[in-house]
Image (cartoon, grey):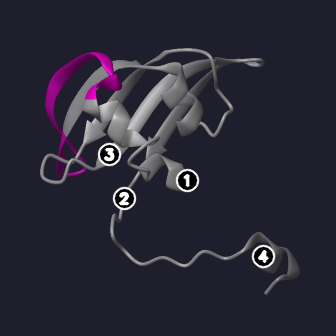
Amino acid sequence: PTLLFSPDVGWRPLLNGELENAELVGLEEVDGVSRYHITGSAPAVRIETITAGLVSEQDVAVDLWLDPDTGHVLEVVFDAETAAGVSTWQLVFFDYGDDMTIVPPEELLRGG
């Protein structure tokens, strides 16, 4: 997940010019929070990063919602072809900057 926020391979390149045919749909309110809605076509290399390699070699039409004050990505929705057919991806991000605890998988398996 950290790759999404990497300045070289994550959201920044997509938002700094890689998003083709980018269009500002407008300012929308979702659950009382204002956000910019942007559509466009994300290049295959960015989609491969976003999906951790599960989707590759295809440009994808995406809908993005950004925080108007910080520019943080709040949500991304897109459909992509996979071996099993079309899959819909919805990534929702929140609590930017909050502390979090990550438990290593082996501790979860041991019940610790």
Determine if the magenta segment contains residue 95: no
The CA distance from mark 2 to mark 3 is 9 Å
Q: Are marks 2 and 4 in contact (CB under 8 Å)?
A: no
Q: Which residue is mark 1?
A: 1
Left or right: residue 16 versus residue 42 is left
Question: How many numbered marks, from 0 up?
Answer: 4
The CA distance from mark 4 to mark 3 is 29 Å
Q: Earlier in the sequence, mark 2 or mark 4?
A: 2
Q: Earlier in the sequence, mark 4 or mark 3?
A: 3
Callout 1: 10 Å neighbours few (<14), some, many (20+)?
few
Q: Given this view, does label 1 or label 4 mark the residue nearer the observer? A: 1
Q: Earlier in the sequence, mark 2 or mark 3?
A: 3
Callout 2 amino acid: Phe
Is the C terminus in the top left, top right, bottom left or bottom right quadrant?
A: bottom right
Callout 1 amino acid: Pro
Residue 83, horizontal then vertical, whole percent: 77, 17
Residue 102, horizontal then vertical, whole percent: 60, 74
Q: Earlier in the sequence, mark 1 or mark 2?
A: 1
Q: Which residue is mark 3?
A: 73
Residue 98, horizontal then vertical, whole percent: 36, 74
Determine if the magenta segment contains residue 19: yes
Q: Earlier in the sequence, mark 1 or mark 4?
A: 1
Q: Circle 1 — which element? A: loop
Q: Residue furthest bottom?
A: 112
Callout 3: 10 Å neighbours few (<14), some, many (20+)?
many
The CA distance from mark 3 to mark 1 is 14 Å
Q: Are marks 4 and 3 in contact (CB under 8 Å)?
A: no
Is 95 above or below relative to 6?
A: below
Q: Are marks 1 and 4 in contact (CB under 8 Å)?
A: no
Q: Which residue is mark 2?
A: 94
Q: Which residue is mark 4?
A: 108
